[in-house]
Amino acid sequence: CNVSVGYKSYGACSSTNYDSVIYRKVRLTGVPSTACGPSGCYYTYSSESCTANECEYVYDRSECALAGVSLGLAPEGYASSDFSTAAYPKGCYFITTLPSNFPRVKFNAVNTSDRCTANINCMCKNCPTARHVLHASGKYCA
């Protein structure tokens, strides 16, 4: 059967004992800085972690430099500098508190911390731009 709520149609539902759960796709709001380059789309997060935001970490040093350039955080031809310590996020990160004339995109080869902060943003890739959220449940199909 097809499901309609008000004037919107949400497609077919799956019924078990006539109980249905309907999800709808919603665009995420508040998606952080985003830029797409030849290797994909990159994002910066100032809280939680790449994993918590359903993204992947940038684990490659050269891809880190590409992400920095794509996001406008590093000049063209930039090679990300290493600053590896367990206190900083793993993979690629961006230090917001350094002056713009300093290299602010860094690569951390010590993969222990996954905490993104307002001062040290994680640089992530392959993040979702939409999610399916519960819209309604109940007896919609008969």
Image (spheres, grey):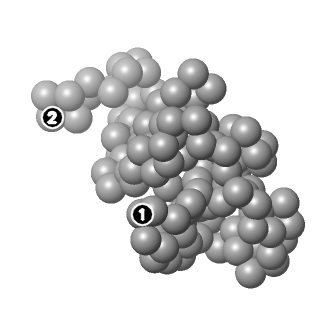
Front one among 41 and 131: 41
Query: Residue at the location (54% across, 46% down)?
Result: 68
Instruction: Say above or below: 115 vs 135.
Output: below
Front one among 80 and 9: 80
Q: Mark 2 points at which residue?
A: 6
Residue 124: x %, y % from top left: 60, 49
Dot 2: element: loop
Q: Tell which circle, 1 or 2, labels the residue nearer the N-terminal end.
A: 2
Residue 95: x %, y % from top left: 54, 69
Quadrant of residue 86 in the image? bottom right
Quarter of the picture containing the C terminus is top left
Q: Name the residue under label 1.
A: 100
Front one among 112 and 4: 112
Residue 103: x %, y % from top left: 56, 60
Q: Residue furthest left?
A: 7
Quarter of the picture containing the N terminus is top left
